[in-house]
Amino acid sequence: MNLSSLGFFRSLRKDNHQFAVIGLGRFGRSVCSTLHKLGYEVLATDIDEKRVSAALTEQMVGHALQLDSTEPAALKEAGIFEFDTVIVAIGNYIQESIITTLNVKEGGVPHVVAKASSEVHHKLLKRVGADHVVFPEFEAGCALARTLTKPSILERFELDPDNSIVEVIVPDEFHGKTITELQLRNRYGVNLLAVSQDGKFQINPNPTKRLERGSAMVIIGCNKDINRLPI
C-alpha cells in the first residue's frame, strides 16, 4: 500500500456490511470467499452461468446472479448501483473490465475497486473512474522476487517506495546479544518494533532482551538501511 491509497481507505464506511463482486475468476472467487467467511453479505455476478452456479453451490456468497456487466440496465436491475463498495474482478478481458468500471461509477457507486492485468490496463481503469486499482499478478511477482533474493525476510509491508516494515529471521550475528548491545538505530538506522518468543510477538521488547537464532524480529526503516542488515 502507498500513501496515495490512504484517501480511498479512509473514505470507506466502517459500518458497511455489503459488497458486490463482478467477475468470478480466481481473484473474484477469493474476494467473495474471504468476505463471506468474515461475515459480510456478498452479491456476486458473472456473465458465465456455470461460475455463478458454482459460487452458490460452494456457498462462498450469499447471492449470485448471471448478468452482462457491460450493460448498465442489467447492473441497475440487479441493484449493483445501490452498493457502497463494488469490486470489479474482471482482469483478463480489458474492454469488459473498463466498460464495467465506467458503468458502475456512472451508476453512482462511491467506492469502486478494479483489478488490472497490465500497466496500461491500470491507467485506463483510473481514467474511467476506478477509486482503487489492484494488480495482483505484479504484486505477487515482486513479492516472489524479494523472497528469492532475501529469504531471511519473511514479510514486507511497504510504507512508500523508500520505507518498509519487515519481519526477518534473527541473523546469526545477533544471536545471544541484547537489543541494547546491538544498537540497531545507531549502527543501521532502523528501529526494532517486536521480537517473537514461543510463537507470539512481544511488542516494544525490553532493551535487555537477548535475541535468539531462528526467531523473528519486526523492523521499520528505509529500504537502504534494511538492506545493510546482515540478513
Image (cartoon, rainbow, N blue to C red):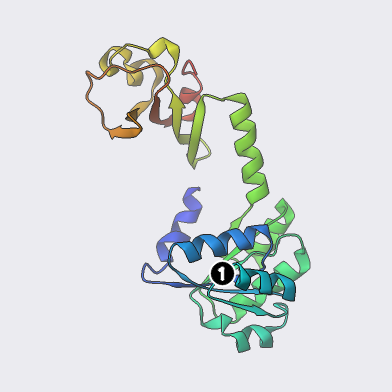
Q: Residue 43, can we see it?
A: yes
Q: Amino acid at mark 1?
A: Gln
Q: Nearer the viewer, residue 168 or 188?
A: 168
The residue at 64%/83% (across/down) is: 75
The residue at 71%/60% (across/down) is: 91
Q: Residue 47, can we see it?
A: no
Asked where in the image residue 168 lies, by quadrant, the reply is top left
The residue at 35%/17% (across/down) is: 212
Tell me: 178 left or right of 163.
left
- Residue topped by disc 1: 59
Asked where in the image residue 104 lies, by quadrant, the reply is bottom right
Tell me: 152 left or right of 190.
right
- Give the answer, above or below, for where 62 lies relative to 167: below
**Mark 1 surroundings: few (<14), some (14-19) or many (≥20) residues within 10 A:** some
- Give the answer, above or below, for where 123 lies relative to 183: below
- Tell me where residue 169 appears, x and y as whole percent: 45, 24
Q: Nearer the viewer, residue 32 or 68?
A: 32
- Tell me where residue 200 appears, x and y as whole percent: 33, 34
The residue at 56%/61% (across/down) is: 31
- Give the answer, above or below, for where 173 lies relative to 14: above
- Tell me where residue 26 appears, x and y as whole percent: 67, 58
Number of numbered discs: 1
